Image (tube, rainbow, N blue to C red):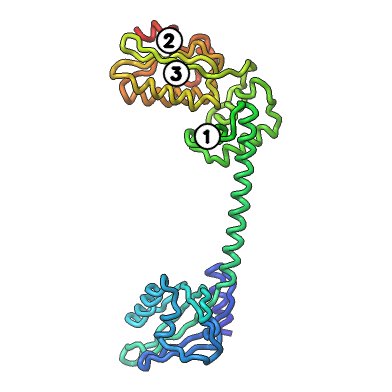
Amino acid sequence: MVTDLVAEAVAGISGSTVEQVGRFDYDAPNDTWTWSDEIYLMHGFGPREVVPTTALMLAHQHPDDRATTVTAVLETMLTGRPFASRHRIVDSRQTERLIISVGQAELDGAEQIRRISGFMVDITGSFRRDLAESTHAAVEAAGASRAAIDQAKGALMLVYGMDEDAAFNLLRWYSQRSNVKLRDLADTLVNATAQGVPMSGDNRRRLDEVFFALAGGRAEPAAASPAGDLVTTVNVEQGIPVLHVTGDVDLSTGPQFTAVLAAAVGQAERPAPVVVDLSELTHLGSVGLAVLTQFHRRCIGKGTPLRLVFGELESLPSVRSAGLSGYQSVEQAVS
């Protein structure tokens, strides 16, 4: 009955099913141990096949857990307080077992330790099952994550005409930039395409908005226009770096736009500004606006203000809502 209560208590606390419960008693003055049959079996012996001793118990402790177990028992012997520990033993067949030990001391009339008694509970089987189930769940989750990422790469390859490595690098770049997990990013893209995002020329704009919305931005409806590439040149006019950008700034060209903008900003010397000419862009997506906003803050801190020439793009609601001021021409921005 007592061992059943101990098993129930240990199972409730540890969340594991109990395999065996054994009782032990230690006679401190005589340094002798008494084991129940279950503890012999835990150590790989038949009942009373060996004489239980302190040395035998220490020899069967797992090397990595031996010091912790000894410390717990010694503290009980010194203070008389109860102890409880979870540790591993290695039985006579070299099989590792996971054990929970609980015990308490009894004092004599002189307040000296007379006896330590308690229970050893074997939870090895349930621990292995729990570990196997957790491992299986982790493998399944990893497989699902890999499948979503592979599907997302396929969508990017189809829409942007890039190879597999470039598609993965693009996903990873946007994941790091937007602080969104790669799996979540891939799931969003897969769900968007599954809901009928059309595979047309303006699909680049649509995917741009899908990713921007995931990162916490407000997506604008994408305008239908032919998808293009990004062409950039950097000139220095009156000591001021001027970055000219033509084509599309969307998800696929976002890394390129970030890199050339960073290079231009790096050329600027305080207090000279950095001028970015966007007047010939055919599309400025939400990714591009996010990058410009980031560099706008960076340039303020550096003391080299970012001056943007939007041209006709300045009338777009997304540009106005970004709070970025613009200039009418490069000449005005430089002067």
Q: Residues within 10 Å of mark 2 (few under 14, many from 20)?
A: some
Q: Quadrant of the N terminus?
A: bottom right
Image location of residue 12, percent across then percent down? 56, 70
Residue occupied by mark 2:
327
Q: What SS does tag 3 mark?
A: loop
- The residue furthest left is 270
Q: What SS does tag 1 mark?
A: helix
Figure label count: 3
Tell me the CA gap for discs 2 and 1. Answer: 34 Å
Residue occupied by mark 1:
169
Q: Residue 47 occupies which quadrant of the picture?
A: bottom right
Viewer-proximal residue among 66 and 302: 66
Viewer-proximal residue among 42 and 20: 42
Q: Amino acid at mark 3?
A: Leu
- The mark lying in front, picked from 3 and 1, is 1
Q: Is residue 50 above or below residue 273?
A: below
Q: Amino acid at mark 2?
A: Tyr
Image location of residue 31, percent across then percent down? 38, 91
Q: What SS does tag 2 mark?
A: strand
Q: Is residue 315 above or below residue 213?
A: above
Q: Which mark is residue 324?
A: 3
Viewer-proximal residue among 146 and 196: 146
Viewer-proximal residue among 82 and 159: 159
Q: Quadrant of the C terminus?
A: top left
